[in-house]
Image: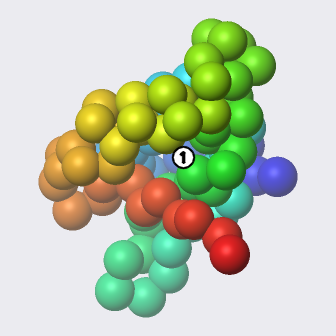
Amino acid sequence: MISREEILELHGDDTLFADGFDDAIIGVAVGFDSGRVIYSVKKMIEILFKDAGMPVDEAYEYLEYNTFGAYVGKLTPIYIETI
């Protein structure tokens, strides 16, 4: 896993992160979306389940409302649901 510090070193201080979810980072986009941090939705839910004691469905709803729809500029993180 790549650390927040390594990402900042490679992509600059303007890189955006979802606070509290560093363990859910699975990479950084290249090409058109270069520099956008990519998170695993499954890992984010696991973090909320373990750290906040949220049931899985509540954790997903929380992320949907508070995180997935938040646009904070061209470096807004990307959230991936694996199949």
Q: Is residue 22 left or right of residue 33?
A: right
Q: For residue 53, what is the image quadrant?
A: top right
Q: Is residue 48 above or below residue 76?
A: above
> What is the residue that sits farthest to the top in this orientation?
52
Residue at x-position 69% and y-position 59%? 26
Q: Is residue 46 left or right of residue 16?
A: right
Do we see residue 79 in this rendering?
Answer: yes
In this rendering, the answer to whether 73 lies above or below 80 is above
Residue at 40% across / 30% down in the picture?
A: 62
Identify the residue at image location x=30%, y=32%: 66
**The C terminus sits in image quarter:** bottom right
Horizontal relation, residue 78 to residue 66: left or right? right
Q: Observer-nearest residue: 64 or 1? A: 64
Rendered position, 83 above or below 35: below
Circle 1 crowding by C-alpha within 10 Å: few under 14, some 14–19, many from 20: some
Horizontal and vertical percent for residue 65?
Answer: 28, 36
Residue 5 occupies which quadrant of the picture?
Answer: top right
Camera-nearest residue between 5 and 57: 57
According to the picture, the residue beneath numbered tag 1 turns out to be: 8
Q: Tell me the SS state at disc 1.
A: helix
Residue 49 in percent (x, y) is at: 69, 24
Scheme of image coloration: rainbow
User: Label 1 is placed on what type of residue?
Assistant: Leu
Q: Position of residue 14 (x, y in %)?
A: 33, 46
Please give the name of the residue rendered at 62% of the width and 39% of the height, measured from the top-left corner. 44
Give the answer, above or below, for where 63 lies relative to 83. above
Give the x, y percent position of residue 43: 70, 45
Q: Nearer the viewer, residue 60 or 19?
A: 60
Which residue in the rendered view is the most extreme toward the right?
Answer: 1
Residue 6 visible in the picture: no
